[in-house]
Amino acid sequence: MVSENHTQNAQGEPPAVARLRHFYEQFGVDALSEIPAVYSDGVVFQDPTHRIEGLPALQRYFARTTQNITECRFEFQGVHLPPGASAWIEWQMHYAHPRLSGGATLSLEGVTHVQFDERITYHRDYFDLGAMLYEHVPVLGGAVRWLKNRMSG
């Protein structure tokens, strides 16, 4: 039985997942005020470089993240809803930062696992940090690409 908190919208998504997707579709400085409607007070947020606990820490993290990017938008390829209050979300991020690849728009694929009640309580991103960052830094990028090519055969 699905509780009221886990009812689904017309696209088959629970409201917490729909709010999360909307937040990231509009991601940027203007969307930061929506964080408390998306994430719970005790949220745990994790990606390849950070583990953040609590809504105030997450708000500070997103404020810092959005300061230097010149573009950041997400396209969602799929939402998978296993039984229970969790979801796996496939996405592609398009982003630009003045210190990466001369400020050009870059793309990165990833997957997010979330757990939720009325809001997101746990958020973990899985993506290739090298493809996001290291490959686009002068000098270091060439070394990372060379190493990846050597390891792949």
Image (cartoon, rainbow, N blue to C red):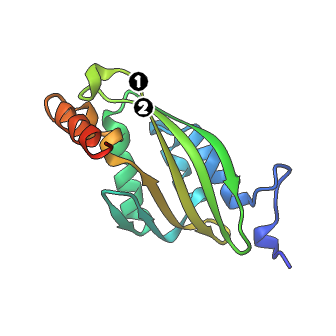
Residue ranking furthest to the front = 153
- The secondary element bearing badge 1 is classed as loop
Side of 11 relative to 66 (left or right): right
132 displayed left or right of 32: left
Q: How far across and down, in percent of the image, does residue 45 sit?
A: 44, 63
- Residue type at mark 2 is Tyr
Number of callouts: 2
Image location of residue 147, percent across then percent down = 21, 41
Q: In x, y percent, where is residue 141?
A: 21, 33
Label annotation for residue 9: none
- 38 and 49: which one is in front? 49
Residue at image position (21%, 35%) is 146
Asked if residue 53 is positioned above or below residue 153 in the image, the reply reads below
- The reply to whether callout 2 and callout 1 are in contact (CB within 8 Å) is yes
Q: Which mark is residue 105?
A: 1
Alpha-carbon span between mark 2 and mark 1: 5 Å
Query: The residue tagged with tag 2: helix, strand or loop?
Result: strand
- Relative to 141, say whether 51 is above or below: below
Q: Is residue 122 left or right of residue 3?
A: left
Q: Residue at x 27, y 35 (%)?
A: 135
Vertical arrangement, residue 108 with respect to residue 9, above or below: above
Q: Residue at x 35, y 40 (%)?
A: 131
Q: Quick one: 74 or 27, which is closer to the camera? A: 74
Specify the label residue 95 is tagged with: 2
Task: Indicate the amino acid at tag 1.
Answer: Thr
